[in-house]
Amino acid sequence: MKPTPVQAWHNLAAAARRAAAEDAAAAAPYGFATRVVAQAFTASERPVAQVIEKLSWRALGISAAVMVAVVALNLSPALNSIEDEVSDLSDDVSLELASR
């Protein structure tokens, strides 16, 4: 996993603290520190696969919400039709038993 810019900055700062004093004589070029900080905090470009993955998770969430809404809207009529079928069956059974 790629470190975040903040983690990378902390790693670089820790490495700079550990550097020996004699390395201070070899100075970095002008503007080097500014470029390093600017690159550390720039938003890295996301590969296409990550963008597609993000969109697919959103689509999954939307489809789950639609599914829950459809089930909620159709639950009452479905339960009513099951009750009607059960009551029709019980009437048929009682008529058959009465005729014997």
Image (cartoon, rainbow, N blue to C red):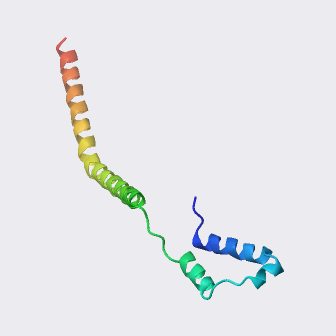
Q: Up-down: is 78 above or below 48?
A: above
Q: Residue at x 39, y 61 (%)?
A: 51
Q: Assign the C terminus to one quadrant of the image.
A: top left
Q: Residue 68 at what x, y percent from top left?
A: 34, 52
For the residue pair 68 and 99, the one nearer the viewer reads as: 68
For the residue pair 64 and 96, the one nearer the viewer reads as: 64
For the residue pair 30 and 41, the one nearer the viewer reads as: 30
Q: Residue at x 58, y 58 (%)?
A: 1
Q: Residue 66 at what x, y percent from top left?
A: 30, 55
Q: How many marks?
A: 0
**Relative horizontal placement of residue 33, taking residue 39 as reference (left or right):** right
Name the outermost residue toward the front: 26
Q: Residue at x 63, y 71 (%)?
A: 8
Q: In which quarter of the view is residue 6 placed? A: bottom right
**Relative horizontal placement of residue 33, taking residue 84 as reference (left or right):** right
Q: Up-down: is 9 above or below 58?
A: below
Q: In which quarter of the view is residue 23 placed? A: bottom right
Name the outermost residue toward the bottom: 30
Name the outermost residue toward the top: 100
**Relative horizontal placement of residue 48, taking residue 24 as reference (left or right):** left
Q: In which quarter of the view is residue 34 placed? A: bottom right
Q: Residue 96 at what x, y percent from top left?
A: 19, 17
Q: Up-down: is 41 above or below 95?
A: below
For the residue pair 77 and 36, the one nearer the viewer reads as: 36
